[in-house]
Amino acid sequence: MDRIEKLRYLNQLLLDEMPEYSPQAAEFPLTAAAQRRLLRSLMNLRPPLPLGAEFLAIQDQVLSVERKERGVVDGDILPVTAAHPNIALWQGDITRLKTDAIVNAGNSALLGCFCPCHGCIDNAIHSAAGLQLRDACHRLMKAQGHPEPNGQAKLTPAYNLPARYVLHTVGPIVRGKVTRRDRDELAACYSACLNLAAEYGLSTVAFCCISTGEFHFPHQEAAGIAVETVTEHLRQDTSIRKVIFNVFQDTDEKLYRHLLGPDRELDESP
């Protein structure tokens, strides 16, 4: 099968499971771009159900090709800062990073984003990893028996991502003024992810900007908490030898650059 045939095949399998979306799916043109958007939408909408081997084989072929097209960025060779020799800053798509683990900022259900093609980091990571990631999270949450509290962490394989694992954490939702509890829970997210990574002997971890998107934590304060918490953790005896702060927006890149101190790689000032 060529690309468009694979996309249409996967979409039909998902529509067989979820026929209620067939009328909307019929509105998508039979082009590769439109069928790919439909596939992402259906994957986002699909509840955690048993996964068929045939579907997964074709899905993994599609996602593998897309991973290569996006380009893999090796976290091991990203330059560190002079002031923080175990910390790097990188601006780009976190689903491209090849590290031991990337951090996903999820919600308390910990099943990924169910809003089709939403722009959140949770949606991006689950969409690039494949439906296996939602299934793995579902099994963890079913065993836990209650929603995921703020400031903790779970670990799953990364499936079709270039990273080995995904660390899932739930940050605080800020409603109005930032509280001490909000700050403590955000710091706990970073600590919990690093502690869990160290339990598994991981050495490179890439963090997204936890809670600063849909959860409305102010970017500047969140960045300060992130840098302070990670820096303190790296002073301890740990398997973690490199932490990457992954940013997407220019605003966050400038904030982290300033917080991490002057460096020829990160600071353009003379």
Image: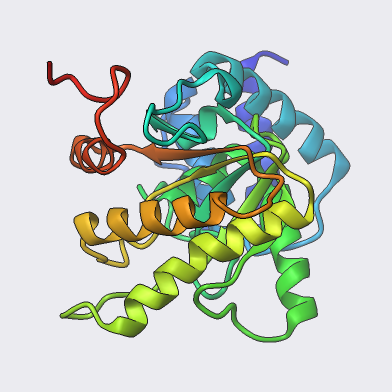
Vertical position of residue 117 compared to residue 87: above or below: below
Q: Who's the residue at 16% across and 80% down the image?
A: 176
Q: Quadrant of the C terminus?
A: top left
Q: Who's the residue at 21% across and 39% down the image?
A: 258
- Residue 253: give x, y in percent of width and height: 26, 36
Residue 171 appears in view: no
Q: Who's the residue at 75% across and 29% down the image?
A: 58
> Is residue 23 found left or right of 111 in the rendered image?
left
How many numbered marks, from 0 up? 0
Q: Quadrant of the N terminus?
A: top right
Q: Name the one closer to the observer, 21 or 89.
A: 89
Vertical position of residue 121 compared to residue 174: above or below: above
Vertical position of residue 138 compared to residue 3: above or below: below
- Residue 72: give x, y in percent of width and height: 56, 19
> Is residue 39 found left or right of 252 in the rendered image?
right
Q: Residue farthest to the left?
A: 270
- Residue 88: give x, y in percent of width and height: 44, 32
Q: Name the one closer to the observer, 150 or 54.
A: 150
Q: Quadrant of residue 130?
A: top right
Residue 88 appears in view: yes
> Is residue 98 found left or right of 61 in the rendered image?
left
- Which color scheme is applied? rainbow
- Residue 167: give x, y in percent of width and height: 62, 54
Q: Who's the residue at 45% across and 21% down the image?
A: 79
Q: Name the one closer to the observer, 25 or 84.
A: 84
